[in-house]
Image (cartoon, rainbow, N blue to C red):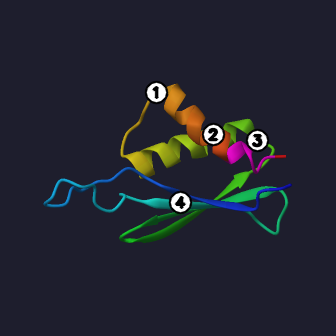
Amino acid sequence: MKITSIELAGSSRTTLRDGTPGLPRAFAKVSRTTDPEYIEVTIIRAGGERKHMVRADCEEDLWSMAKCLLHELEGVDGPNSAINDYCRELQRFAE
């Protein structure tokens, strides 16, 4: 079995009047591209989309993208344990 894409949602940035969470601050779609050397990460925000091409065989690229995802989706520059959570998701697409 091989995973070809996943979608991630960030934490809620708003709260509705009744106290329930509103829309997430951002979404991300992670997929393996037709070019086997790269993982494509698309960050989707209210203002538009931004695509990143991450080398699938480079741990430094995966870690850097995981830090970016944490910042964009959660709005924080968190601890390594939080970065690890995103990095594990990206590693599903790694070589």
The amino acid at mark 1 is: Pro
Query: Residue 66: x, y in percent?
Result: 57, 43
Which residue is tagged 2? 87
Badge 2 element: helix
Q: In which quarter of the image is residue 37?
A: bottom right
Return the residue nearer the eye: 10 or 20: 20
Report the number of numbered marks: 4
* Sequence-first tag of 1 and 4: 4
Q: In percent of the image, x 48 and y 70: which residue is there?
A: 49
Which residue is tagged 1? 79
Return the residue nearer the eye: 62 or 84: 84
In this rendering, the label closer to the viewer, 2 or 3: 2
The reply to whether dot 3 and dot 4 touch (C-beta < 8 Å) is no
Categorize mark 2 by other alpha carbons within 10 Å: few (<14), some (14-19), many (20+): many
The amino acid at mark 2 is: Cys
Disc 4 to disc 2, how far (Cα)? 13 Å
Which residue is tagged 4? 28
The amino acid at mark 3 is: Cys
Disc 1 to disc 4, how far (Cα)? 20 Å
User: Residue 9, labelled with which disc?
Assistant: none
Disc 2 to disc 1, how far (Cα)? 13 Å
Query: Residue 8: x, y in percent?
Result: 53, 56
User: Residue 58, labelled with which disc?
Assistant: 3
Q: In percent of the image, x 50 and y 33: which residue is there?
A: 82
Categorize mark 4 by other alpha carbons within 10 Å: few (<14), some (14-19), many (20+): many
Query: Residue 60: x, y in percent?
Result: 68, 37
What residue range appears in magenta? 90-94
Disc 3 to disc 1, how far (Cα)? 21 Å
Categorize mark 3 by other alpha carbons within 10 Å: few (<14), some (14-19), many (20+): few
Categorize mark 1 by other alpha carbons within 10 Å: few (<14), some (14-19), many (20+): few
Query: Quick check: 45 left or right of 84?
Result: left
